[in-house]
Amino acid sequence: MTLDALPSHPGGAENLARLLARALLAGHWQPGDLFPKELDIGKHFVVSRNQVRNALASLTATGLLERTAGRGTLVREMGEWHLLDPLMSEWMTGLVNLDPQLVRAIYAFRFSAEPTVAGLAAQAASAEDIARLEAAFEGMRRSAGNPDARAQHAEYDVAFHDATYRATHNLVWRQMGHLLRPSIMALVHRSQHDIKTLDDSLTRHRHVLEAIKACDAHAAETAAREVLRRTAIDLGIVS
Amino acid sequence: MTLDALPSHPGGAENLARLLARALLAGHWQPGDLFPKELDIGKHFVVSRNQVRNALASLTATGLLERTAGRGTLVREMGEWHLLDPLMSEWMTGLVNLDPQLVRAIYAFRFSAEPTVAGLAAQAASAEDIARLEAAFEGMRRSAGNPDARAQHAEYDVAFHDATYRATHNLVWRQMGHLLRPSIMALVHRSQHDIKTLDDSLTRHRHVLEAIKACDAHAAETAAREVLRRTAIDLGIVS
DNA sequence: AGCTTATTAAATGTCTGACATTTTAACAAG
DNA sequence: CTTGTTAAAATGTCAGACATTTAATAAGCT
């Protein structure tokens, strides 16, 4: 794989890092492949070697690449990626070509973890947490009918689930909320968006909200499981 | 807080990063404080500005610091730390002064998540996973009586739990295994290490192993919960 | 031929100094 | 008192030379 297929980009090491990271996430290189040399990248995108090195440092820190002096830059396999790094989540969101294996892995994680998270939220949620959840839900409801507001709807969806993770009041679970964004954003491209589907999804989210408000952990777990069943259908993981 | 209290260090930006990170994790600076300037750090440790910048870049990437041109380097609060970053885990392991709030947060996460993980492992474990678990358990058993082998025992303990996370065959859960190391290593400094305690811990681990071997998800969940109850006592979280 | 050892080339890592940019604070003018 | 200007200090960026590591190549010996 060469750099020629990649679009040119506005300045800044962060943008360059995002560009290269997305190409890697989309599978433009195979694990074990040699990544282009610093000087070639700099020449291609017309940036200084410094910028290239900063960008590559990010990709190395997230486990996408492995660099060794003299040898070059190697592409690492998916198992080495730091999927929980917030940078990684940012790079993944909005990527249409995301590897289906990865989408399934993230979904499987959510399906096993999120009921527990919802249960903890039901036990620990403060008034502020409830307010966040209600605001997100209201946003979802308002933007449900409008086909022009799909992206906005997804944002509220992310906000709802993120609020759930936050409501656990646990630092570790809260960090994991980052992982939601790419998973939920993938829905924008894949699901149907007809009224019936959205209404069903909305109802299931409402059940989660109500269970958390009622401090009913068991009901929250069950309701979260139902939301994820809907998500599985929309993601095309099950029919 | 100044740099004077910190030990001098062998060369390399990674070592410098670890040194500074541990000082931050131990709470030597308050959130919102100004961190020392690049040039001061460089002067103090007798390293080039490059090394300092590389080290600070790591601390920024893990959310420990926030840097802005002209303003300086600010210390961020615990809620912003990327606790799931493998680098962070490496920095935390072996740190005796780890903030008790953080130890509790990580433990609370494990207590809510690890039963689920063990259940998934019981459903998905391959022969190779079982072998890893058995090897780790055997190592724990062998090093249990010897008071000189506490560190080794902790390593096998980490290996056992890490093998459990791996056995889920889920990329996300597997990443989370990194978080175990600091949590388990903290036990070396805090728990009693008398024969009775170790034997009890060993028995509970054995129950997890057997449940996974029997593909009994429910039993694995229960057994994992029992292991963590033992851990809570050893960490001094409950009496 | 086959093995070992120098040599060379190429890649990443490091150092240095100068300069650019951003932010804050001091200060002067209105 | 407010506003605008200026100066200082911090991080960000660049360019070039050099160091170090690695792999391939060539030379030389048995």
Image: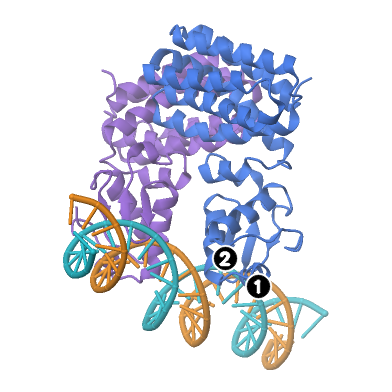
Chain colours: A blue, B purple, C cyan, D orange
Residue under label 2, please give it: A52
- Residue B119 appears in view: yes
Instruction: Return the disc, 1 or 2, that comes first in the chain's sequence.
Output: 1
Image mark 2: chain: A
Q: For label 1, count other residues whose C-alpha is less than 10 Å away and answer few (under 14), some (14-19) or many (20+).
A: few
Q: Is residue B169 visible?
A: no
Q: Position of residue D24 (x, y in %)?
A: 72, 76
Residue A206 picture location, percent across and down: 57, 12
Q: Are marks 1 and 2 in contact (CB under 8 Å)?
A: no
Can you say whether A111 is above or below A87 in the image? above
- Identify the residue at image location x=53%, y=7%: A219
Q: Is residue A239 left or right of residue B110?
A: right
Q: Nearer the viewer, residue B203 or A185?
A: A185
Which of these two is toward me, B87 or B70?
B70
Instruction: Indicate whether C21 appears above or below B122.
Output: below
Q: Please state the horizontal and vertical placement of residue A88, each as a whole percent of the image.
A: 57, 44
Q: Amino acid at mark 2?
A: Val
Q: Residue at x 41, y 52 (%)?
A: B60
Which residue is labeled 1 in the image? A43
Task: Locate the C terminus of chain A and report the quarter of the image it occupies.
Answer: top right
Q: Which image quadrant for residue A82?
A: top right
- The vertical placement of B19 against A133, above or below, is below
Q: Position of residue A53 (x, y in %)?
A: 54, 65
Secondary structure beneath dot 2 equals: helix
Q: Residue at x 51, y 42 (%)?
A: A86
Q: Residue B81 or B205: which is nearer the viewer?
A: B81
**Dot 2, crowdedness within 10 Å: few (<14), some or many (≥20)?**
many
Q: CA distance from mark 1 to mark 2?
A: 10 Å
